[in-house]
Amino acid sequence: MVVSEMANEKATFPMAEAKKIVEDLFEPSTLTYWADFLFNAGLGWTAFYFTVQAANFSPAQLLFGAISVFCLYRAVIFIHELTHLKKDTFSVFRAVWNLVCGYPFMVPSFTYMGVHIDHHKQKMYGTKEDGEYLPFVLLGRFRIILFFLTMLVVPFVFILRFLLTPISYLIPPLHKLLWEYLSSLSINPDWKRPAPAERDGKWWRLQELITFAYAAAFVFALWKGILPMKVFFVWYAVATLILLTNGLRTVAATHCYRNPADHILEFSEQFLDSVTIPGNPVTTGLWAPVGLRYHAVHHLFPGMPYHHLGEAHRRLMKELPANSVYHLSLRKSLWDGLSRLWKETTAAQADKAAGNTSKAS
């Protein structure tokens, strides 16, 4: 029913008009990228240091910990921008991002590149070939809860995954297993990453080895007492809280997650399955940083840099008709997005139960 409703509305979406409204907003600002990233990465790691130094569970530690989480979350989420920047551009920025965020958090840029590119392909979006899509509404509330529970173990799993890298080179089936199931920032646990290809970038193996070096050095320093175990616990807490915050954003402000895996959505249907939560730029920007609160706009214009998405949204709101389907992608807040997903999932489960009862009778 939801799919057919979207199909009926897609003809009214003024895509040509929308493109004309934002046609001057596709040039990335190098200064903006560097200033935003370096400020948040620098402040985040500085706060991380003071979190380690502060007394456990003291007000100072909680304050520095919160600063570290939100600043490093913003810095880490630039991985999304790296995927959409044109090839052979921002080369130094990509390298620095990996050194400062990608390798320390065990998420080098290759873990997202090919995965996210496929997510934007019209014939793959929302299907079983899309690692970034899981039809929570159809799968039930338990899958939403399970999604958040897995966030608690992901940092440890990724450390172990990269520590196994050298051994996996000697055992090809092991490396195949690591590549398919533990080398991607995906949300679908049943999805297998395709074999390495050009879309994954030419440096993925070097990134894999450098991440191993970071993980091995970290474990060695903890083992020998060069770093106190408190560093590990703070790192784990920060990484887990980043994942949980991003998980909230993912289920509330990314997509509606209604599409069955065997249905290919048209472009307009993909837009109507996407979400934008403009909100307050300060508070909303904390849990949906780097333009990700404008996710429906991003799916309209994947090549638009994050720092122009807000302006694009404001123009579209102003210049498109009040009855445009553009407005159907809007949510009022994080809570609005979460509650809608939960209610739709509950309703879908009730419908499924009613259908099973009807068949049984």
Image (cartoon, rainbow, N blue to C red):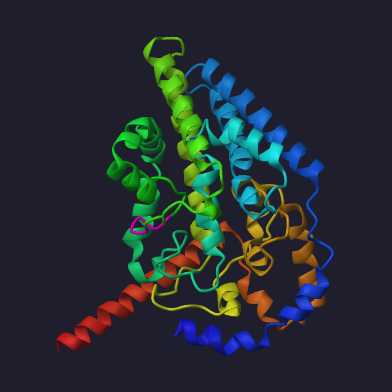
In the rendered image, residue 252, in percent from the top left (x then y), is placed at 52, 60
Instruction: Determine which quarter of the picture holds residue 158.
Output: top left
Eyeballing the image, is 127 above or below 79? below
> In the displayed structure, does residue 348 sit left or right of residue 196?
left
| Residue 226 appears in the picture as rendered | yes
Residue that sits furthest to the right in the current view? 24
Residue most extreme to the top: 225
Magenta highlight on residue 188: yes
Q: Residue drawn 52% across and 86% down?
A: 5
Residue 85 coordinates in the image, percent (x, y): 68, 52
The location of residue 237, given as percent across then percent down, is 46, 32
Where 247 falls versus 122 (above or below)? above
Quarter of the image for residue 136 reads: bottom left
Q: Nearer the viewer, residue 304 or 359?
A: 304
Q: Nearer the viewer, residue 174 or 170?
A: 170
Q: Quadrant of the N terminus?
A: bottom left
Residue drawn 44% across the image and 73% down it = 258
Magenta segment, which residues? 187-191
